[in-house]
Image (cartoon, rainbow, N blue to C red):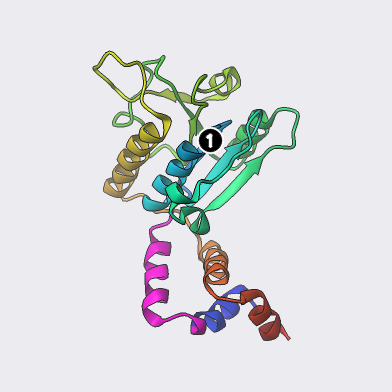
Amino acid sequence: MTTSELVARLKEFVSDERYELMQKVMNARTRYMTVVLEDIYQTQNASAVLRTCECFGVQDVHVIENRNTFTVNPDVARGASKWLTIRHYSDAADNTAEALAALRADGYRIVATTPHTNDVSPDAFDIEAGKFAIVIGNEKRGISPAVGAMADVCMRVPMVGFTESLNLSVCTALIVSQLRARMTAAGIDPGLSADEKDDLMLEWLMRSINDSERIVERLMR
């Protein structure tokens, strides 16, 4: 049984309204933009970023765990992690280098966020030059030197106050919301293929249906 055939069978276990909503959300999902979290240690910040990504249709979040283990705070994330693809990098000698190399090999431009540069603002970033990964650094240290060295471009949110920087979850929300709006205005395709949509819909249905593994096992016989 193919993935699309399995999706067709499993959708019978959710209401028509629920499946239509899942399809609507699916059609707005994007992998043209992705978010990378480097060594975040405050669960409320990491979870708020997940919630932001889910709300603005960013499907993949890449989590680099060097010193700190990534933990989701369910009260903050409000179920967002259920609908996202979260990729962890925690086993290499240099998890940051591994993550960024993998993203670049997949065609992503590496965009480092930092208040210490005037390189480019979100409204001036070249949105049409190809897909991109927004790298958000640690609460205390910001991005690591490795991210700065590997980045294709650095991005800074313009500010006019005395405070040097924004909370990282707020910074992420500002950047992601503005760049997603610019993608829409530019007519950029969200970037999920038919096969990717089938695979993702299967994951969503499996997470939404009680005893889904047993049901799938029965259908596959």
Say left or right for 20 vs 152. Answer: left
> Which span of residues is magenta-colored?
12-29
Quadrant of the frame with the N terminus: bottom right
On screen, residue 117 above or below 46: above
Indicate the position of residue 63 as horizontal and vertical percent values. Answer: 58, 39
Indicate the position of residue 101 as horizontal and vertical percent values. Answer: 64, 33
Quadrant of the frame with the C terminus: bottom right
Q: Callout 1: few (<14), some (14-19), or many (20+) C-alpha neighbours within 10 Å? A: many
Q: Residue at x 70, y 80 (%)?
A: 217
Say left or right for 56 vs 41. Answer: left
On screen, residue 35 above or below 82: above
Indicate whether residue 19 is drawn in magenta.
yes
Indicate the position of residue 3 as horizontal and vertical percent values. Answer: 61, 73
On screen, residue 41 above or below 196: above
Q: Residue at x 63, y 32 (%)?
A: 68
Question: In the image, what residue type sits under mark 1?
Answer: Leu
Q: Main secondary structure of the magenta part?
A: helix
- Give the total number of marks visible in the rendering: 1
Q: Residue at x 54, y 46 (%)?
A: 72
Q: Residue at x 55, y 53 (%)?
A: 85
- Between 43 and 29, which is closer to the camera in this rendering? 43
Say left or right for 29 vs 94. Answer: left
**Outermost residue toward the left?**
160
Residue corresponding to mark 1: 37
Indicate the position of residue 108 as horizontal and vertical percent values. Answer: 53, 38
- Between 67 and 96, which is closer to the camera in this rendering? 67
Q: Secondary structure at mark 1?
A: strand
Indicate whether residue 35 is drawn in magenta.
no
**Outermost residue toward the front?**
75
Give residue 209's quadrant in the image: bottom right
Evaluate whether residue 1 shows in this view: no
- Between 117 and 14, which is closer to the camera in this rendering? 14
